Every structure is written in C-alpha cells, then in structure tokens.
Amino acid sequence: MLELEAKQQTKISNWVTATWDEFTKITADPAYAKARCYYNNGQMRIETMPVGADHASDNGIIHFAIGLFCTLRGIPHKGLINCSYRKNGIREFQPDISYYLNENLQSAPFGSSVVNLDQTPVPDLVIEISHTTLTDDKEAKLLLYQDVSVPEYWLVNVEKMEILAFKIANRDREKITQSQVLSGLEISILEQALQRSRQSDQSKTGAWLLSQFQ
C-alpha cells in the first residue's frame, strides 16, 4: 500500500502492485476521470500523459482507414475510442481504439457504463497508439491482451510510423502482416497512410486509401 500511495503522487505512470479494491478506489477519484486505466495480474497503471499532435493524427487516420475499409467491403463493424473494459476483480483495459466485427457485432456494448466482460465478449481488435508508452504497449499490454484472449492486437509506433500486428489465439501470439479479423487488409497500406498523412492533408490521405481499397 505504501508503494501505491507513493506512486499515486506521481500519477501512477508505471505498473505498481495493487489490490482490485485499491485500483477501483483510486480510479473512481474525479482526478482520474480522463485517465486511461489498466489492471492485470495484481498490477495497475494509470496514464494521464497529454496527447501530442502526431499521436492524435495517427489515431484519426487509423480509425478512418478501418471504417473506410469496412464500409467498402461490407464488413459489419463498430469502432470504439477509449472504451473501458472490465472483468470484475481481475482486469481492466482501455485501448485507444477497439472494434467489434461481423457476427460479434450483435454482442457489441452500448450505454455509458464501463463494459462488463462478464456479460460482453472482448472486442475482435484492439489498437494502442504508442509514443510515450511504446515499451509498455509492447510488453505488459501485449501480455494483458493475450491473457484476455483478444483475437488481434495492433501497436502503432507514432515515431516510426510503423505497426506491429499480432494474431492472438489460445494465449499465444503470432506477428502478422495482414489482418486476420479484417480479411484482405494489408498492414503495410496503413503504414503508408500514416507516412502520407505527415506529408499531406488528411483529405489526400483519405483519397489515397480509397484508391487502395477499391
């Protein structure tokens, strides 16, 4: 508890040991209303870092690209930004973007409450846009998403404009270059879109994506 109290003074920017009750008590504090909160295997992390322009832009490009791809290919989808998921007493996570796809769309959550994973399945795809949290997203969060058996996880490296994508099955992971949950979507196309968005406006990037997906 002393470790947790000490870390609370510095916004708990690293993973620290905590009970579930300690985690829920701290995250209920209004001071963390806009924070992103994670809990897994008796460890918690709260992210309160400001979001820079490149991070925000990449988030928008990836969200737009997936929406465009799904619309053109007729893939039922529901994208959620900064949605919180909770399996009571065990874990909580809040990825930058998450998606329910195809037949899983019927089970997609709604309402203003934290998604209860005891009643709702995990999303088909979770995405972390990583700049200041890159190491954590490659290690602790990847393990978290393995533990919860999310089918696919993408890590967007803001600085390098690269995407690490993983297929997750039976808590094993495999690096992939083509999405398994969005059939036909090449990860390299999204990386090129990120690169183009740094050199031109988003309308031109969107037009280029349209030409690639049609």
Image (spheres, rainbow, N blue to C red):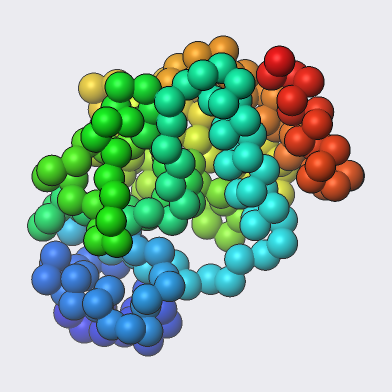
Q: Position of residue 108 (x, y in %)?
A: 29, 39
Q: Is residue 127 visible?
A: yes
Q: Is residue 167 visible?
A: no
Q: Position of residue 206 (x, y in %)?
A: 76, 35
> Total label count?
0
Q: Position of residue 11 (x, y in %)?
A: 41, 78
Tell me if 100 is positioned left or right of 107 in this view. right
Q: Position of residue 170 (x, y in %)?
A: 23, 22
In the displayed structure, would residue 19 be above or below residue 140?
below
Tell me if 147 is positioned left or right of 64 in this view. left
The answer to which of 105 and 23 lies nearer the viewer is 105
Tell me if 9 is positioned left or right of 127 in this view. left
- In the rendered image, the quadrant that contains the C terminus is top right
In the displayed structure, would residue 150 be above or below residue 4?
above
Could you tell me which residue is drawn at 57 percent across and 51 percent down?
130
Could you tell me which residue is drawn at 72 percent across and 62 percent down?
53
Q: Residue extending furthest right?
A: 199
Could you tell me which residue is drawn at 81 percent across and 28 percent down?
208
**Which image quarter: residue 43?**
bottom left
The answer to which of 73 and 179 lies nearer the viewer is 73
Could you tell me which residue is drawn at 25 percent across and 61 percent down?
113
The answer to which of 79 and 42 lies nearer the viewer is 79
In the displayed structure, would residue 52 be above or below residue 69?
below
In the displayed structure, would residue 52 be above or below residue 27?
above
- In the rendered image, the quadrant that contains the N terminus is bottom left
Tell me if 82 is positioned left or right of 58 in this view. left
